Image (cartoon, rainbow, N blue to C red):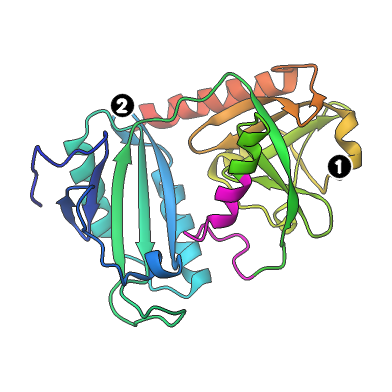
Amino acid sequence: MNNSNNLKHENFVCCVNGQLVDPKSGSISVLDHSIVVGDGVFETVQVVDGVPFTLRRHLNRLQFSCEGLGLAPPNEELILSSLDAVLEADANAGLIRITWSSGLGSLSSSRGGGPGTLIVATQPAKQWPDSEAVHVCPWARNEHAALVGLKTTSYAENVLALKVAQEQNCSEALFLNTAGFLCEGTGSNIFVVIDDTLITPPLSSGCLAGITREIILELVDVVERDVHPTEFDLISEAFLSSSTRDVIPIARIDDLVLPNIPGLVTSEVITSFATFKATELDAK
C-alpha cells in the first residue's frame, strides 16, 4: 500500500479498496450505490492505544449485515490490511469506520452487480459529556422493516432524529417502535432501572444488537423486555451504550429529570465494562 504523509484531512485518514487516498479528493464514484441510495453496511470501531477494540465482534456483525442486505461480504484480509494501513498513518486514531457498499450501480434502486467498495477511515475519538439528555422522537421505528437488526448506511432517519433532538437541547434521540414500546437511540442502545431491575428493550423491539449492549448482557444481570413510556416515571436511573461512548448515564428524558446520575446500578455497569475493556486490551 502507498503510505503517503500528505493524506490527512481534518484528522481523517482514509483507505479505499486497499489504497490510502486523500479524504477530500473524489475517490468514490458518483455512481457508487452507497451514495446513490445508501446501499451498504458499516461498523464503527473504537481504537484504544492503536488497538481496535472488540474488532472480531464488529467483523461478525458486518458479515451479518451483509447477509441480511444480500451483499457478498468484503474480503477480510483486505479489511485487516486496510486497518493496518490507516492505523500506521494515524497514530492518534480514536475511531475506525469500516464501510462496504454494493459498488457501482444505476441511478436507481437496481444494483450494478460489480465489485463492492471498501472504505476504511479513521477519525479522532468523540468527546462525550458525563451524562446525556435524550429526546423521544415523534415518529416510530418500524420493528417489522426489512433492515431491522442490520447496520446499514441508510441513516437519514437517524440524522433527522438527532437534529430534532439537538434542537431540544438533547444529545441523543430515542425511538419508540410501532407498538409504542421503547426501541433504541440513533446510535445507541438504552438501559433503564425500574424497581432495582436493569432492563433493556429486546431485539424484537427493532433495536440494533449493539456490541456494547452484547457485552453488558454478558457481564451483569439484565432483563430484556418491552418498556412503555407510561413506565418512564418509574425509572430511577438509565444509561446509553454504544461503541463510541461505552456507557453514559442519562440525566434527562425530555422533561423527566432522573434523580441518580450515575446510580448504583449504572456505576456497577460502568465499572464492569471498564474492567472487561482493560482485560481485552491487555490481551492484545
Q: Is residue 222 above or below residue 118?
A: above
* Residue under label 1: 229
Q: Residue at x 59, y 66 (%)?
A: 147
Relative image position of residue 137 (x, y in whole percent): 72, 46
- Give x and y (percent) for residue 173: 66, 41
> Is residue 217 in view?
no
Q: CA distance from mark 1 to mark 2?
A: 40 Å
Q: Which residue is mark 2?
A: 49
Name the secondary structure under disc 1.
helix
Seen in the image, is 75 located left or right of residue 134? left
Which of the 4 image quadrants contains residue 192?
Answer: top right
> Disc 1 residue type?
Pro
Give neighbour class at mark 1: few <14, some 14-19, many 20+ (Cα, 10 Å). few
Q: Quadrant of the C terminus?
A: top left
Looking at the rendering, the stretch of residues picked out in magenta corresponds to 146-161
Number of other residues with Cα within 10 Å of mark 2, as a class: few under 14, some 14 to 19, many 20 or more:
few
Where residue 68 appears, as percent x and y from the top left, is 53, 70
In the rendered view, tell whether residue 54 sits above or below residue 75: above
Main secondary structure along the magenta-highlighted residues? loop
